[in-house]
């Protein structure tokens, strides 16, 4: 898909196409030489962002949780989360225009807060990406067996057999995304773009079909089901818990900028892709959730808080149409997994290129044939499969780790927006001339983004039984899992960086830009805080 062509000069000839040398020069200013192939256009970068958010994957996977904890009124968390994430996205747009570079979160945090903040933000995001890869893969188990019992390869789909089958299906999906990413960004972009196109068309058709079956008025989304009664915070406490169903979906829009070194004119296209991905996800996802609540035959059916949107689709639209929609959900899950894997690879490559990971020279190596870092694809895939295996005998622990991964992503975003706010207050932040800029709104938007990030991180980490110990027996270490796990990962990881990697950090010679007055690339030199 392409937009209107460039305007013609007065002489009637076509305007010159974009010159990639300008993008390569911007990369050289950051100390890196161009190695990844620039093949991605406007729609490819948009598709990368929206496939990570994945409207159908997130809404179908988490609708049941929102209804169970907040009733139909949980819907209002969707615009609330959008408003907060929009503030973050606007800050990212300025950064994407100024620093169009792979591993965006890591590099942005490094540029704004220094190498220590950059490493910690990158480490949080990388760890979360590998856990998220496993979590998204589990969504196959929620959908495929509902399409056909044939996909329940192990057992009858209850108890440990469901967990074992989820691991099997998830491993197949992770293997697929590993192979696709290893064979180059062009193949990944084609599959991802085709999948996103199908997902968007299916989502819009689903909105129209649900709208055609509306049986109640909009006041239904004010129904709280009496949840929160007798609790200290009342329904507000229940709503904050239910809001996690929206917070778990609307993130990952930065993926559009993480492919900056493989995109054409990324300083212009990446900010647009970030905003378009977030806004499109909000509008279409919000309508799906709204019309699902207004069209389901029985708003009080217990299946709503068990099977979620899958139940709504089958009960409202019938088995034939419902199965078609569920197949589209499978496609959405697949491209979402592909986008999560892709983003993780670029992040690992960016950190390794700065000699900030073990075996950095191997992880940062770009395949001369496929022009993509192959080893990170394999390593991240293997780690994701290993995490999946935890789900067989310890599903409670896995659900805790999955929830914590989302918090770590919000914290990684804070590692960008908070230093950016500090730079603004010091008068040191200047958007790239002629590119995306918030102008005088920059400071208030950035301030709200930081407050939102802190508030939602606390909400996500709060030791609720409904999130961290939903089924018995109750364990204190599960309830406080967010603080314990993040503490171990954050402090342990940073201790490794401080005592081992910190003295080695610096752009590897094989990846360093060549200075105009020198024929040899920069040697790896330690960065100063």
Image: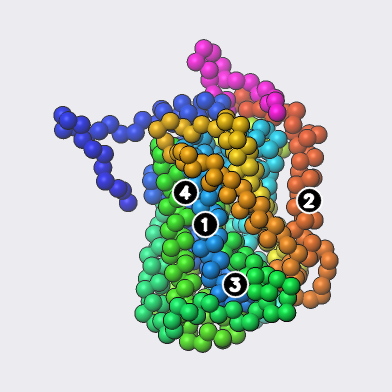
Does residue 352 appear to the left or right of 82 in the view shown? right
Q: Which residue is mark 2?
A: 487
Q: Residue 59 appears at what percent x and percent y?
A: 53, 68
**Residue 107 part of the magenta segment:** no
Instruction: Tell me if I can see residue 498 in this picture.
Output: yes
Q: Residue 329 appears at what percent x and percent y?
A: 48, 68
Determine the CA span between mark 3 and mark 4. Answer: 26 Å
Q: Which residue is mark 3?
A: 66
State which region is magenta.
511-529
Helix, strand, or loop for circle 3?
helix
User: Which is nearer the eye, 235 or 264?
Assistant: 235
Q: Earlier in the sequence, mark 2 or mark 1?
A: 1
Image quadrant containing the C terminus? top right
Q: Residue 406 appears at what percent x and percent y?
A: 64, 57
In the image, is residue 427 above or below residue 273? above
Q: Residue furthest top?
A: 517
User: Which is nearer the eye, 460 or 174?
Assistant: 460
Determine the CA span between mark 1 and mark 4. Answer: 14 Å
Q: Which residue is mark 4?
A: 274
> Which callout, 2 or 1, points to the residue nearer the camera?
1
Indicate which disc residue 83 carries: 1
Instruction: Tell me if I can see residue 262 in this picture.
Output: no
User: Which residue is drawn at the image coordinates 31% and 48% (left, top)?
Assistant: 2
- Residue count near mark 1 (Cα–Cα under 10 Å), binned few <14, some 14–19, many ≥20: some
Q: Residue 323 appears at what percent x and percent y?
A: 45, 77
């Amino acid at each position: 898909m392409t937009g209107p062509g460039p305007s013609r000069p007065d002489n009637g000839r076509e305007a010159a196409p974009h010159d990639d040398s300008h993008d390569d020069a911007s990369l050289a200013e950051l100390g890196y030489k161009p190695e990844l192939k620039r093949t991605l256009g406007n729609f490819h970068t948009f598709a990368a962002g929206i496939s990570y958010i994945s409207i159908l994957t997130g809404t179908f996977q988490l609708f049941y949780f929102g209804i169970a904890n907040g009733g139909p009124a949980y819907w209002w968390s969707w615009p609330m989360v959008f408003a907060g994430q929009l503030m973050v996205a606007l800050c990212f747009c300025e950064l994407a225009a100024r620093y169009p570079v792979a591993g965006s979160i890591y590099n942005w945090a490094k540029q704004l807060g220094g190498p220590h903040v950059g490493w910690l933000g990158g480490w949080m995001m990388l760890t979360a990406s590998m856990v998220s890869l496993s979590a998204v893969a589990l969504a196959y188990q929620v959908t495929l067996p509902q399409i056909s019992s044939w996909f329940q390869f192990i057992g009858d789909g209850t108890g440990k057999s469901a967990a074992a089958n989820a691991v099997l299906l998830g491993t197949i999906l992770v293997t697929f995304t590993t192979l696709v990413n290893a064979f180059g960004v062009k193949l990944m972009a084609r599959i991802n773009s085709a999948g996103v196109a199908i997902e968007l068309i299916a989502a819009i058709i689903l909105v129209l079909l649900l709208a055609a079956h509306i049986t109640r008025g909009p006041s239904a989304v004010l129904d709280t089901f009496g949840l929160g009664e007798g609790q200290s915070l009342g329904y507000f406490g229940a709503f904050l818990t239910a809001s996690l169903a929206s917070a778990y979906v609307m993130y990952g829009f930065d993926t559009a900028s993480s492919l900056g070194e493989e995109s054409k004119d990324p300083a212009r296209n990446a900010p647009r892709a970030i905003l378009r991905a977030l806004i499109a996800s909000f509008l279409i996802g919000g309508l799906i959730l709204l019309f699902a609540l207004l069209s389901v035959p029985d708003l009080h059916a217990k299946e709503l808080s068990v099977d979620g949107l899958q139940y709504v689709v089958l009960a409202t639209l019938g088995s034939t149409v419902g199965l078609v929609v569920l197949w589209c959900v499978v496609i959405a899950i697949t491209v979402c997994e592909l986008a999560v894997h892709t983003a993780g690879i670029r992040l690992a490559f960016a950190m390794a290129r700065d000699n900030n990971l073990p075996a950095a020279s191997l992880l940062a190596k770009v395949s001369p044939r496929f022009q993509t870092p192959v080893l990170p694809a394999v390593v991240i895939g293997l780690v994701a499969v290993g995490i999946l295996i935890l789900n067989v005998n310890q599903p409670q622990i896995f659900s805790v780790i999955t929830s914590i991964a989302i918090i770590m992503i919000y914290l990684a975003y804070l590692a960008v927006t908070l230093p950016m706010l500090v730079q603004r207050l010091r008068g040191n932040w200047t958007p790239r001339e002629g590119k995306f800029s918030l102008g005088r709104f920059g400071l208030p938007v950035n301030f709200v983004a930081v407050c939102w990030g802190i508030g939602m991180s606390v909400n996500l980490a709060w030791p609720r039984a409904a999130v961290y110990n939903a089924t018995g027996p109750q364990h204190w270490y599960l309830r406080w899992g967010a603080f314990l796990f993040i503490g171990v990962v954050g402090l342990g990881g940073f201790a490794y960086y401080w005592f081992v990697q910190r003295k080695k950090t610096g752009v590897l010679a094989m990846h360093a830009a060549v200075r105009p007055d020198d024929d040899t690339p920069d040697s790896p030199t330690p960065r100063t805080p």
